[in-house]
Image (tube, rainbow, N blue to C red):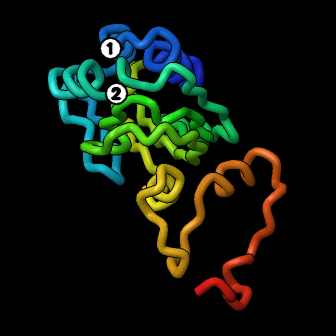
Amino acid sequence: MDDLGAIFDEHLRAEFDAHDAAATMATMSTQPHLYHLPTMLGGNGRDEIFRFYRDHFVTKWPKDTTARRISRTVGEEQLVDELVMEFTHDAPLDALLPGIAPSGKHVFLPVVVVVGFRDGKVAHEHIYWDQACLLKQIGLLNDPSLPVTGAEQALNLIDGSYATNAMLEPRKDV
């Protein structure tokens, strides 16, 4: 049995440490797919994914980007990583914020990645995050009457210091 965690860790190193689209593709199967669910970006097949990685994802992360793993669950053919991504939105970030100019804001974003494997390679990635959380942090979602939170989502995963159920309390600011 392949060590799925090691395979995916190599994939992540190629993406976030080396920023190398070709090296990232070397970790993927012959017919992969990649879906960034909140933005409907990614690709089907090696050519489409390579172009997405090269032009919009792997080579485009802000320089201060870090990913902190909160948890990892590994099955026979699939793994799920729960991560907190941290970065300063100081460059265009098409994969998460297509068409949005850099805000200069610092972001903490909880992300879940569901990864399938075939023949010892990454066959698919389904990547989820709360787009409202991201938009709130960069200043595009400011309506206080909406039941959305920002960085505190991710920070609570890291250290548990934020109160839960605060949204159930009567609101004085709306």
Residue at the spot x=48%, y=67% of the render?
142
Question: Could you say whether the residue bearing mark 2 is in a helix, strand or loop?
Answer: helix
Residue 57 — which label? 2
Locate residue 17, reporting x and y percent: 52, 13
| Point 32% across, 14% down: residue | 21
* Residue 139 pos. (x, y %): 47, 55
Residue mark closest to the camera, 2 vs 1: 2
Label 1 crowd (10 A; few <14 / some 14-19 / many >=20): many
The residue wearing badge 1 is: 21
Horizontal and vertical percent position of residue 97: 34, 44
100 vs 125, nearest the viewer: 100
Q: Is residue 29 above or below residue 17?
A: below
Which residue: 34% across, 20% down? 28
Disc nearer the start of the sequence (2/1):
1
Secondary element under disc 1, as helix, strand or loop, is helix
Q: Nearer the viewer, residue 62 or 157?
A: 62
Q: Residues within 10 Å of mark 2 (few under 14, many from 20)?
A: many
Image check: 157 left or right of 139? right
Against 69, residue 98 (above or below) is below
Give the amino acid at mark 1: Ala
Kindly identify the amino acid type of the residue bearing the numbered disc 2.
Phe
Q: Residue at x 50, y 58 (%)?
A: 136
In terms of depth relative to the viewer, which is nearer, 105 or 131? 105
Task: Verify CB contact (< 8 Å) between mark 2 and mark 1.
Answer: yes
Q: Residue most toward the bottom?
A: 170
Q: Quadrant of the N terminus?
A: top right
Q: Considering the image in quadrants, where does the C terminus appear?
A: bottom right
Asked whether residue 1 is in view, the answer is no
Q: Quadrant of residue 106?
A: top right
User: Could you tell me how far apart the alpha carbons at marks 2 and 1 are, in whole angstroms?
Assistant: 9 Å
